[in-house]
Amino acid sequence: MANGSYQERREEIETYFDRTAADAWRKLTSDVKVSRIRATVRAGRDDMRATLLDWLPADLTGKRLLDAGCGTGALAFEAARRGADVVAIDVAPTLIQIAQERTPKDLGPGSVHFEAGDMLDPAHGRFDHVVAMDSLIHYVPADVVKVLAGLAGRTCGSILFTFAPKTPALALMHAVGQLFPRGNRSPAIVPVGPDRLRALLTEEPALAGWRAQRTKRIAVGFYTSQALELVPA
């Protein structure tokens, strides 16, 4: 999939994370002190990461995992410690550089290969599991489904992803203001109702062999995101 709206949005996201807010995300994904608002986002992200990791097998030895939108690498490191060979992709070279700097010397039995690029690039190969944590929330629902369809064609196990659920609380937060100051605000998050998203997934021919299974919403302060698991039918 490489339609115009996906490519345009991807370029906006790359610019934001690679230039505008790289330092903010370096701090947010570390253990340095941050504002109370950002602390809630950090806590929410930690909870979401733990949820997605809990949905993966405890033993990933010999499995290939795509971390689609890996950011600074926290989930990739944990998957590698379980034995996975992780391909960690992000649109922002700066975030990839931070992830590489943070790579532990001992990842146990697994490995991580970081690369700046497109998570849909077929050159990345096939996978047993795919995780896309908060990397699809900036795309319109139709493009999210097309991305998932593209990933499904190269995945034999589960696809775990998150979306921004359409809730009154989330709408209010974005009406008042986004996470970061005006100078480094992120590209707008695109909320979608869970029922609407499930309907779009059902209508996508390329996902006919898949079904939605577990779901969980994490809401901590200024962080609201919902995880959904897709598995072969």
Image (cartoon, helix red, strand yellow):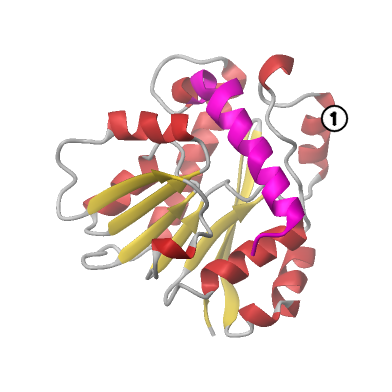
Magenta stretch, main secondary structure, is: helix
Say if 132 sits above or below 178 in the image.
Answer: below
Magenta-colored stretch includes residue 24:
yes
11 lies above or below 128: above
Work out whether residue 19 or residue 49 is closer to the camera in this orientation and state it: 19
Specify the amino acid type for callout 1.
Answer: Ala
Q: Residue at x 52, y 75 (%)?
A: 153
Side (left or right) of 170 relative to 131: right
Tell me which residue sits at (77%, 31%) in the image.
Answer: 173
Q: Position of residue 6 (x, y in %)?
A: 70, 53
Task: Tell me if residue 37 is in the magenta stretch.
Answer: no
In the image, taking residue 74 as reference, residue 103 lies left or right, namely left
- Image coordinates for residue 36, horizontal then vertical, percent: 58, 17
Look at the image and give the residue range highlighted in magenta: 1-25
- Compared across the picture, whether 110 is left or right of 190 comes to left
Crowding at mark 1 (Cα within 10 Å: few <14, some 14-19, many 20+): few
All told, the count of numbered labels is: 1
* Residue 230 visible in rendering: no
Query: In the rendered view, does 207 fall on the left or right side of 196?
Result: left
Q: Is the C terminus in the top left, top right, bottom left or bottom right quadrant?
A: bottom right
Compared to residue 33, the image places residue 159 above or below, namely: below
Is residue 223 among the parts visible in the rendering?
yes
The one nearer the camera, 75 or 171, is 75
The residue under the point 72% across, 70% down is: 198
Residue 181 position in % (x across, y down):
69, 16
| Residue bearing mark 1 | 175
